[in-house]
Every structure is written in C-alpha cells, then in structure tokens.
Amino acid sequence: MSARRFYQMRSPKKQVKIEGYSFGRMKVGGNTFEKDLILYPDKIEPNWWREQGHALSANDLRTVFQFKPDILVVGQGAFGRLRIPPETGSELKKRNIELISGTTDDMCPMFNRYVQNGKRVAGAFHLTC
C-alpha cells in the first residue's frame, strides 16, 4: 500500500471549506476535485478509494480513525448510493465517533458548519452516484 498524499492548508489558521459541489466535482480550498475525498479541518485527502466501491467499510476509514474525530460526516453521493453497513456504524460507535450521513449535497454545508464551529470533524465524500 502506498503512502497517502494530503493537501495541507497553507496557513495554520486556514480551515478547509467546501466551496461548491456538483455531480462528480467538489471545490475545496480553491481546488477542484473529481474523485472521492476525505476532508479534515486543516487538510484534504484526495483520491479516496474504498475496498468495495459503494459500501463503506471500517478499513476505508483508517486515516479518519488516526485523526480521531468526534464527528464523521459522510456524503453518500448525489443519489445516496454509498451504503454504510451496520458493522461500519458499530465500529464508529465503538470509537465514540458520531456518524452523520446523507446525500453529498446535503452534507457539504453540514461539514462546513462543524469546521466553522471548531468541531473535531472529518468528512468522507462520494462525489458521483
């Protein structure tokens, strides 16, 4: 497995903000991304790939678990096709991570609000279906 590449925000005071979302595209920190990604308050993990495509497993969230957020916001795609199996929800609960999920369009402003309010939050976003 190769090392993950992150985009770190240039200024220590600069926070990640989702500036726009449309099917297959998300604009964050002035950059447009066309592959799924994980966001943190101060960095971006682009090209996020899941083991099972449209199912979210605990293994898909390894870097999120290292960050130890209080909240995980999951954008399940434009039509909500990214499934969150019960065992993934159980693993999040075991780690005391609150799961908030819905369509990606609905979850973008939610993620931004949590970051703006200083919450320890991560966001995992499926950009297509």
Image (cartoon, rainbow, N blue to C red):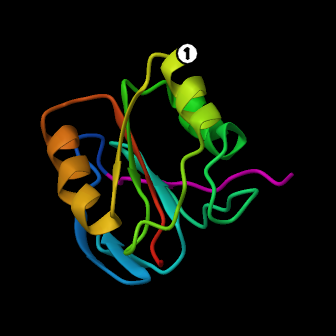
What number of labels is visible?
A: 1
| Left or right: 96, with 85 as reference point | left
Q: Which residues are magenta?
A: 1-10
Residue 8: image location, x then y, percent: 45, 52
Residue drawn where x is 19% and y is 31% of the image: 118
| Left or right: 25, with 89 as reference point | left
Front residue of this view, candidates 48 and 29: 48
Q: Quadrant of residue 31?
A: bottom left
Residue drawn where x is 30% and y is 41% of the image: 12
Residue 17: tell me if it is visible: no
Residue drawn where x is 37% and y is 24% of the image: 70
Q: Any magenta on residue 97?
A: no
The secondary structure type at the circle numbered 1 is: helix
Q: Any magenta on residue 7?
A: yes
- Dominant SS of magenta comes to loop
Residue 55: image location, x then y, percent: 63, 56
| Figure check: 33 above or below 99 | below
Residue 92: image location, x then y, percent: 52, 27
Residue drawn where x is 43% and y is 69% of the image: 77
Q: Residues within 10 Å of mark 1 (few under 14, many from 20)?
A: few
Q: Name the residue carrying label 1.
A: 94
| Left or right: 36, with 80 as reference point | right
